[in-house]
Structures are given as C-alpha cells and as structure tokens.
Image: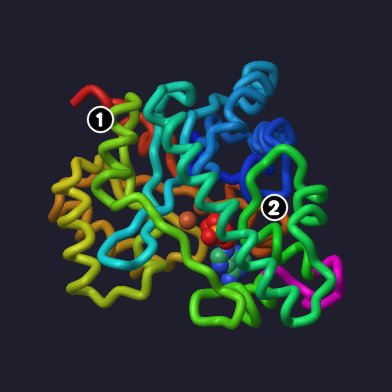
Amino acid sequence: MDKVDLHVHTTASDGTVAPKYVVAQAAMLGLKAIAITDHDTMAGIKEAGEAGEMMGVSIIPGIEISSDYQGREVHVLGYFLDPDAPALQEYYEKSHAAKRERNAKIIEKLQKKGFDITLEAVEAENPGIVFGRPHIARYLMKLGVVSSVSEAFRRYLDRGRSCFVGRELIPFAEASALIRKCGGVSVLAHPLQYGYKRSELDALCSAAKDAHFSGIEIYYSGYSESDRAKLFDLAEKYSLLPTGGSDFHGDNKPEIKLGGVEVPAYFLIMLARSQFN
Ligand code: AMP
Ligand code: ZN
Ligand code: FE
Ligand code: FE
C-alpha cells in the first residue's frame, strides 16, 4: 500500500532538516507524498516542491497554525493552500511580529537568570527565519544549560515555567476561515495533545465541524490503536475525514521519525477531494 506523511516540519520553522533533505529522506523511504506543514509559514514549500519533482515525491503545500480555542493553544493544519495568497501574507506578518516581540521577552527573562544569551546570538544561529521556543531551547543546549530541547521546555520554556511568555493567537474558527479563503482545507491537528477529557474533545470536534474543518488527525506519532479507535468514532460522529502524519522535526524531536506513522495514501486522496465539496 502506498504511504504518505501529512505532518512534517523543516528548517523553515522548527525542524532541523532543510526542505530538500526532508524530501530526499522521504524518497529513500518510498513515501509517495509528504505535506510540509511548518508553523505559521510556508517558506519551505518552494524548495521542497522543486526537490520533490526531481525525486518523485509529491509535495503537498501545507501550514500548521497555532490558534486560540477557549484560551488554549490548538493547532490547525491547512493543506493545498496558495502560499502567496494575500490573506496569508498578512497572517505571516502578524504572527511573526507577535513571535519577535515574545522572543525578546523570553530572552530577557533568561538573561535575568544569568544565561549568556542574546536575541542577536539566537538569530545568528537561525538565519532567515523567525525563530521560536525550540530554537531558544537549542541555544540553551549549545550553552550547556540543558542537555535536550525537551529539558529546556520542562525547566524554562513551557507554559507555567519561569521563562514562559504567551503570545496572541488567531481564534480557532478564524484559522480555518483563513485557510479556506486561501484555497485550502482545514484539519484538526493531534487532538489528544491538548489534555482534554472525552466531553471536551467532543466539543472541540463539534467546533471544528462548525468551522468547516474537513478532517481530524487520527494517525499520529505515539497514538495507540485504542486512541485511533476513539478518534475514528469522533470523526464519524462529526463527518470529519481521517488524516495522519508523524510531526517530524528532525533532532528537535529525536524520537519521531519521518514516515514513522504509516498513513495510507487514500487518506490524502479523500482529503484532496474534500477541497471541492
Ligand atoms: P513556539 O512556536 O515558540 O510557541 O514553540 C512551539 C513549538 O515548540 C511546538 O509547536 C513544538 O514543536 C515545540 N515544543 C513544544 N513543547 C515542546 C517540548 N516539550 N519539547 C520539544 N518541543 C516542544
Ligand atoms: Zn514544531
Ligand atoms: Fe502541533
Ligand atoms: Fe507539528
């Protein structure tokens, strides 16, 4: 059966592997298609698309938008959108400005702890992108303050930790409206990562349906058979298509492998068809 991976990050956001090398890996793994879903940017799509053409891997243009759902951060995946759509340009600018402002505040807090870190130094390590907490985490690793990205989050950067700073996020339904306006379809990302109990998860799926989502991510790194069964029930209840992907980030999430979750190609075909519904 043909396999795809519909949730992949690159160096355009917080992955550690450049788009063309991600595509090369996908080709070696025999994946038919991958969707590049970087956080709040589609800057990696062009390079990935060109590599995909050479290497025989279809590249689905995607994005992962961090949205606000009732005060919590919920991720919305968009597929098949036009990276150059004016509404998206506006969104990149807004969200990147919010990230820059927040980065400065986080780094100030880290400096107060006595760490030898500056905005300029982290920028220099990550040229050409608007960086986020994972890049700050890697810089703390470089300083020898922590030994892994996850330790940096656990000790300093996670919500509730001493150097956490929030940022304003686009409302959940608006994220979907934006994706659809730019020709795309919306999918609820990793529904079990938000710490919701069953009734809350049901309400989230209901809200996704109301916001014209097409699908829900059911195959995901670490999700068990019973997790999937629970999510398939919700997908059926709210007429959402099943989708899936690994959430590959290279060394920033070393336990996650590209194509590590076996996603059948027909998930992608059904999602592509939903674009025209
Ligand atoms: P930011 O965009 O700056 O809010 O960073 C959020 C990103 O950091 C998420 O999308 C994840 O990819 C990553 N992240 C969040 N928590 C962790 C963690 N505990 N360990 C590793 N990466 C994380
Ligand atoms: Zn990420
Ligand atoms: Fe996510
Ligand atoms: Fe992701």
**Which mark identifies residue 274?**
1
Within-10-Å neighbours for mark 2: few <14, some 14–19, many 20+: many
Indicate the amino acid at tag 1: Ser
> Residue 268 magenta-drawn?
no
Q: Which residues are magenta?
A: 141-149
N-term-proximal mark, 2 vs 1: 2
- In the picture, measured across the screen, residue 29 lies left or right of residue 70, that is right
Q: Quadrant of residue 85?
A: top left
Instruction: Compare residues 204 and 35 and report the one nearer the observer.
Output: 204
Whether residue 65 appears in this view of the structure is yes
Q: Secondary structure at mark 2?
A: helix
> Residue 142 magenta-drawn?
yes
Note whether 16 is above or below 234 in the view shown.
above
Within-10-Å neighbours for mark 1: few <14, some 14–19, many 20+: some
Q: Which residue is mark 2?
A: 250
Could you tell me which residue is drawn at 43 percent across and 32 percent down?
Answer: 90
Q: Quadrant of residue 59?
A: top right
- Ligand 4 neighbours mark 1 (CB distance < 8 Å): no
Instruction: Compare residues 230 and 35 and report the one nearer the observer.
Output: 35
Could you tell me which residue is drawn at 69 percent across and 52 percent down?
Answer: 250
